[in-house]
Image (cartoon, rainbow, N blue to C red):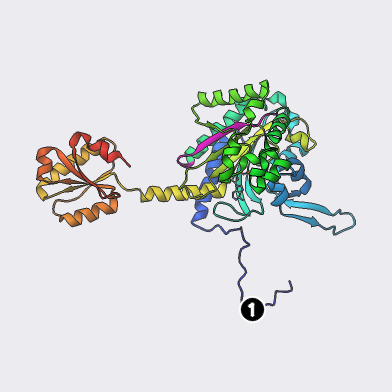
Amino acid sequence: MSNAGDKSGSIVKAVRGTRDLLPPDTELWNRVEATARAVFGRYGFGEIRTPVFEATELFVRGVGEETDVVSKEMYTWEDRARAASEKAQQLTLRPENTAGVVRAYIEHKLGETGHLRKLFYIGPQFRRERPQRGRYRQFWQIGAEVIGPQSSGSESAIRDAEVLEMLASLLDELGVKGWRLALNSVGSSNDRPRYVAALKAALEPLKATLCEDCQRRAETNPLRVLDCKVPEDQATIDALPKIADYLDEASTAHFAEVKAALDACGVAYAVEPRLVRGLDYYTRTTFEFTVPDGSGLGTQNALLGGGRYDGLSEMLGGPKAPGIGFAIGEDRLILTLQAQAQEAAAKKLDAYIAPLGAERNAAALALARELRRAGLSVEVGDGSFRLKKSFEAADRVARRVVLLGEDEVTSGVASVKTFATGAQTKVERDKLVELLSVE
Ligand code: AMP
């Protein structure tokens, strides 16, 4: 408190990479969280709240020492003993929540009922990353885990498909447009060492040609090379061995079952052989949902990620408890919804019909009815407007203007101007819908 009396007048600001969430934005945060709770409830999930800080060892053992998250990004401190009865401890602000949930599962013997556990959480996570749009040092995740003893069906591919179908439903219910599901299998603890060995061998003669990060990863954690975004490295990395060729029969069958179940419930996905994700605990199914460019996330287009972690409980000293889960980046979800809402608000109508002269008003209305019935969005001007005023009004609200003068009415050929290109064309009435539908 030595600065308490400092009257220098400088303002204390929020720490770099952290943000205040203010109204009206918080309304959207609350709506998103309420929708997530409602959807999770329909699938039988219950809420879990774990501490914001945990023993550092939990993340070292669970997430993996060689991951970027653990090796570079954790907020860790030595918590000194205050009394003789207390031990000093290494503590860490949680960088993710799965390890905490699995620790709680073990600690409270949640597996002893023999049933599947379905738990969700909503809360802040902390990583010392380079802040940018969509990437913060304190960020929120909405996540869920399905975990239980093998006898509860926790290892079944149907669990994976159900979690993915739930996410598809949640994103649709929230109104996220254009999301894309990328899917892969990283194999079991049986397959992974064989693949990593093959990858390491393939990288050995090539690594000198790759970026500096990849040269290091090739040694410490070859799987991470697949994540590289450096353009010059892509061709080399695409030609590396694929994990699909190293899956054993059981993992191949498991992945095929996940895909078949998704096909059966109509959830679209794209298999991406390079999707391995940043945390070590993943086994078999891994996935990521992204949104298209222009959805407000810049280069951070991953909305959420997750996967199966069949060995995590054992890594943390617990019983065998296969599981699958995901974490949605809530900050990114909100940015996406805001950007997409803005885009929708700014979206122009397909056409503005400009009757040239009051005697063309009725014909304009008839044409508007025809176009609207064909599914187009249309506004009608007024025959009393001068041509210039019609063009200005049209440009404000629509992508194209359809001019309706005497010629057009008698000949059945419409004059259409496209504002984006400035092109003006004459088009037969039966081709009009087609032309106006072009974005
Ligand atoms: P991960 O826990 O790394 O699998 O990340 C899951 C999701 O959390 C990502 O897809 C992002 O949407 C989000 N996320 C991860 N790190 C950050 C961050 N630093 N800032 C904002 N969102 C993040």
Position in image of residue 369 (x %, y %):
21, 39
Most extreme residue toward the right is 84
Q: Amino acid at mark 1?
A: Ser
Compared with residue 1, is residue 134 higher up or lower down, i.e. above or below?
A: above
Q: Is residue 203 visible?
A: yes
Q: Quadrant of the C terminus?
A: top left
Residue position marked by numbered label 1 in the rendering:
8
Position in image of residue 240 (x %, y %):
62, 34
Query: Left of 301 or right of it: where is 420?
Result: left
Query: Left of 413 or right of it: where is 235?
Result: right
User: On the image, which quarter does residue 317 sit in?
Assistant: top right
**Residue at the image point whose x is 62% and y is 41% from the top:** 227
**Residue at the image point whose x is 66% and y is 48% from the top:** 212
* Near-viewer residue (373 or 188): 188
Position in image of residue 155 (x %, y %):
67, 26
Image label count: 1
* Near-viewer residue (3 or 221): 221
Q: Quadrant of the N terminus?
A: bottom right
Q: Is residue 49 visible?
A: no
Is residue 260 highlighted in magenta? no
User: On the image, which quarter does residue 219 sit in?
Assistant: top right
Q: Secondary structure at mark 1?
A: loop
**Residue at the image point whose x is 87% and y is 58% from the top:** 83
The crowding category of the residue bearing disc 1, from other C-alpha atoms within 10 Å (few below 14, some 14 to 19, many at least 20), is few
Task: Tell me if the residue at label 1 has its CB under 8 Å from ligand 1.
Answer: no
**Residue at the image point whose x is 69% and y is 39% from the top:** 222
Start-end of magenta stretch:
174-188
Position in image of residue 111 (x %, y %):
74, 31
Compared with residue 393, is residue 259 higher up or lower down, i.e. above or below?
A: above
User: On the image, which quarter does residue 144 sit in?
Assistant: top right
Is residue 181 highlighted in magenta? yes
